Every structure is written in structure tokens, then in C-alpha cells.
Image (spheres, coloured by chain):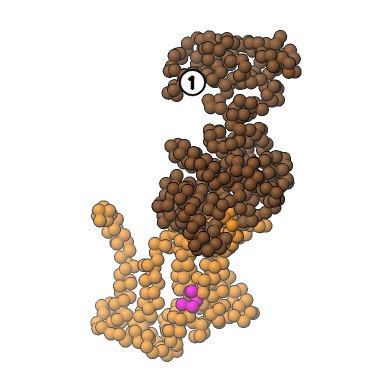
Amino acid sequence: MEIRLEKFSKSFGPVRVIEDMDLTIGDCEMIALLGPSGCGKTTTLYAVCGIHRVTSGRIWFGDKDVTALPPQKKNVGVVFQSFALYPHLSVYENIAFPLRIRKDSAADIEHSVKEVAGILHMDELLDRRPGQLSGGQQQRVALARALVRKPDVLLMDEPLANLDAGLRLEMRSEIRRIQQESGCTSILVTHDQVEAMSMCDRIALMNEGKIQQIGTPDEMYQQPRNRFVAGFIGNPPISFCDGVIQDNRFVTEGLEFEIPDRLEAASMTAGQKVTIGVRPEYLRPEFAAAIEGEITFVESQGREVLYDLTLAGGKVFRSIQGGGPKFKLGENVRWGIDIGAVFFFDGQGNRI
Amino acid sequence: MDDRKANWPLTIFLLIVSAPILIMYLWLFIDSISEINVESIWPQKFTLRNWRFLTEEIIGHGSVWTATLNTTIFATSVVTIVVVLSSTAGYALSRLKFPFRAQFLGFVLLLHSFPSVTLIISIFLMLRMIGLYDTLIGVILVKAALELPFGIWIMKGFYDTVPWEIEMAGLQDGASRFQVWYKLVLPQIMPGVAALAIFSFMAGWSEFVLPLILAPSSDARLLSVYLAGLLIDDYLSDFGLFKAVGLFYVVPVMIFYLFTQDKLMNIYGGGTKG
């Protein structure tokens, strides 16, 4: 089922959390609402499921207007960050709860619960209480309870935040598998770009109540619309550096290079202030545009090594290189930048 | 067993401290089945005469069974009213937004700390006015009303520990607000409800001042009033009888307490864990 948010706004008293947000999620698609804490992603999720009332704008499920519907009237499955399992009920009863409320027959309930338990590989857990389960198992129960009544939409609020690192990796692919098997249109709220990029078809990156950019993970990484997107997506993060344009050259203290042809045609005037963004993988010894400085930080990540390169003027660039630690802390080096992969941002932070 | 051994010094200390109380109860029991001369403290002879009140009416005081029945009705009614109203009011105060909520909470706390005896004259007048003076119903209502602030406050504390997300999940699963409360939230605070019920029962069973003033006649008399009546009867200075009735009065509560004390501890634990 397609979900459509039209000029959706939400205020809490005088505080406007979301302003005029437009978002369309295609049928069977899984989209991530990604952003730093306080950006309004959970608020958006709660509005879609009906827990929060919408201040203005419309929400559509397919061609049905669900803006004013209470949560009970929407067929939406939600996985909460804390899982919100019912501690006094067995796993079986937890999963069966939505069906019991709907007054399904006992046989139907048994069939549906067994089916969803099978998909989630948890048949042997049905008699236990939530308190007797590990974090990953609780997560599965929460997911099963959300899926058991075949929801139009599946919403997940930071579903992996309460799991330890190894389990998180496992559940990441598990949730994606189940989402694809069930064909449920899904929204995943997360602050973790890795989760968003690895699990979802598309990402809506939010900041301060507005969507900064919507796109596939690759688009977000390779074509960030503005400085915020470029800075948020990518790990280790991109390095920014302020400078000016002079005679078709980018100039800053300790670094100078000719700007690519595609930018000359754009409205780049002499003396214009710009910010460049260089991803760490595009700063390496083999690239052309020379950049000189001192290595001020070395961190081995095993397969790759992360360096900080500090220029004469104090500007710092990050570089990531494979093949073991070839350079030492304090060493003066002359590396290069892949100019074609450098992002240019104007004074407002928009990409040129 | 190792734990208990390690705690021997503590056990002995507690035994010494509580010895006077234990000895008092023991003496109460012994006295109730013995004949004692006034000038002696040691019992002389075994007798069951003091327990005659179980089978016959004590002249001028009526049957102990009427008083027992009244006390049971009184205590269970107080429990019912307090539990039902506190568990609903506590939920509203913990979860719902309504005008003057904070003021209401403050007022409830004030009422809880208010010495209820100071209200007794106005309560007496009010009961007279509405025709509930000297009835069991009247004194039940008064006692329940005085217990309510405590109950509401305690229940609110228990509800506060239930996570919001459980309720959100319930709504999302299609349940109405009432179903969420009844099927999901209430079961989680059952330890609190049980503790409050026990507490109110004991408070009701041992209540003395209110029934003495508000329901003195024999039809509505409670055990506590019955017992006090025996003591102040000038013509019947039978201390053996008084002690036997006293024991009869206290034993149900002691047995009840033995079986429920672990649940009662919840109320003082603040309801953090059931």
C-alpha cells in the first residue's frame, strides 16, 4: 500500500516540530527516516500510526484519507524501540493480542500465530514470558506481533537500538528479509546511517523538522543535495573546508587547485566563498591535485587505516587508505585529491 | 541455611527487641484459657469459661457473631470501594491530561496527611443530616473516603512505573483505551492492587474511633466497639472474657497478615518491582 504525506505539519503547543512535509512511500517499499535526535522522525512515525494527531496536512494510505483516524482504525503494525511487549502474557498471547482484540476465532488465531512464528523462527519460544527472552528474541516477538494481522504498513522506531552489536547485524538482515517476504510497506526510524543504508530502498534524511533529501542510499552518498546530507551520510565522515574562488581556482590557506569544468559554467564568480567537501577515500597519495601537510592522527581499522592530514593553515582533512599503516604520525606527506569527486557548497550550504 | 547462620546475631537481636510483644500475645492467650486470682500473675486453673461468648450472648452486649459479621462486611466494603476508586482515579491522575490535575494531586496528598479525627464532628452532623448516622453504610462510606487519598496516591505511583509504550502498543493493536487499561496496564500493577487491598482490609478491621462515634448501637456495632464496650462495663469487670474476645478479634488479622505480608511490602517498595 502506498503511503502519502501531504504538507504534513505537527506542533506541540507553540513548538513546530514538522513543517509542510511531503513524502511518498511506494507500495512494498521500505524507507528510512534518518536524522539526528530531535529532528522529528519519531514524531512523523507516531503521526502515521495515529498516536499523534496531525496539526495540519493530510496522510493517505493508498487512496484512503487516514489523517483523522485513531490508531485502532488503522491497520498499522508498530515495533517500538523498547519492544513494548506485554510482560504478563506469554509470547503466544503477546502475538495473539491484536487478533483477540479483533475477535478472530480461536482456530484462526492459532493458525496466524503459528504462521508468523514460523517466518520468524521462534516456534519453540511461544510458551515463554517476555522476561525470559534475550533481547533478540524479544525483538522477534515485537516484530511478530506487528506482522501477525497482516498490516497495510509496518512502522519501526529504532528497532535495533536496544540490541548489542552482533545481534544488531543479524537482525538488520533478518528484518529486511521479513519485510521483503511479507511485502509490507515499511518505515524505519533510525539515527544510524549504516542501518538506513543497508536495510532500506530509499532514505529520507531529516533535520530540524524538514526532509533534506530523499533518495536511494547511493544517491544520498554520491549526490548529496546540501552540506548537511554530505556531512551526515558517510563513515568515516566527509571533511569540509572553506575557501574562495579566484581565476577558476579554489583557494584556501595551504591548498589550491583548479575547479572542474562543469563548475566553470555554473554561476561561480570570482571571490565567491565556497565550502568544499572531500570524502576520505578521495584523498590519497595517487590522486592528482596536490595537498601537503602533516599526519596528525592515525587509526588502524584493520583492513584500512584512517589518517588526519593537517595543512599548513590548520585545516584538517581525513583520508582512508588500504594496505596497512604505511605512514607515521608526524610525517610530512604530499598526497592528492580526486577533484572530480569533490563537492562544492555555496554560502547557504547547497551543493553547486 | 548458610544465609540464616550468618544472620544469627541479627536474629537474636530482633528476638530480644520484639520479645515484649511476643510475650504479651502469649500471655493474652494463656490468660484467655485460665482462671487467675486478682493478686496473682500466674494462672491457677485451665478453663474455657472465658470463651463462652462464642455460644451465648453476653448480657447487655449482644452476640459477638453479629459484630464479627458487621466487621467483615465493613472491612470488605471498604476494600472494594478503595480498590475500585483508587485504581481508576490513580490511572486518570497518572495518564490523562485534565484541568487542575496538579492541584488535585496536591489536594489528595494534603487530605492524606490530614488528621481525620478533627473532622469527626462535621462528619457526624453530615451523617445525621442525610440519615446515615448509626448505620453500617454510613460508617463504611466515611472510612472508605478517609482511606481513598492514600490509595489514590499509591496507585498513581504504581501506574507511573508502567511504560507509555505498552499503552501505545495496545492502541496500535486495536484495543480501546478501556481495554488497554483493563487488559494490559492493570495486570501489571496487580501487586500494588493486592497490597492496597490488604492494607485497606487491615485498616478497616482495626478501625475503632469512627464506628464508636458514628455507629454505636448494637445493630451496626463492630468488633472493636464490642470489645471496648466490655471493658467499660461497670457491672461486668470480667478481664478473662475481655482477653478472650480480644484474642478472637486479633487472630484473623494475624493469620491474614502471615499469608499476605510479602505482598504488603510492595506498597512500601514504591511499586518498582512486582
Is residue A63 or residue B178 the one in the foreground?
A: A63
Q: Residue at x 48, y 72 (%)?
A: B204
> Which percent across, then down, holds residue B273?
44, 55
> Which percent across, then down, holds residue B194?
46, 65
Q: Residue at x 56, y 27 (%)?
A: A234
Chief secondary structure of the magenta span? helix
The orange-coloured chain is labelled: B
> Which percent across, then down, holds residue A79?
54, 47
| Three-letter amino acid code of the residue under disc 1 | Leu
Q: Is residue A115 magenta?
A: no
Q: Residue at x 61, y 32 (%)?
A: A216
Is residue B234 or residue B31 the one in the foreground?
A: B31
Q: Residue A189 sits in which quadrant?
A: top right
Taking the image as shown, residue A142 lies to the left or right of residue A7, namely left
Q: Give the magenta range.
A: B72-76
Above/below status of A246 relative to B273: above
Q: Is residue B1 visible?
A: yes
> Which percent across, then down, holds residue B29?
31, 76
Taking the image as shown, residue A49 lies to the left or right of residue A84, namely right
Disc 1 secondary structure class = strand
Subunit bearing disc 1? A
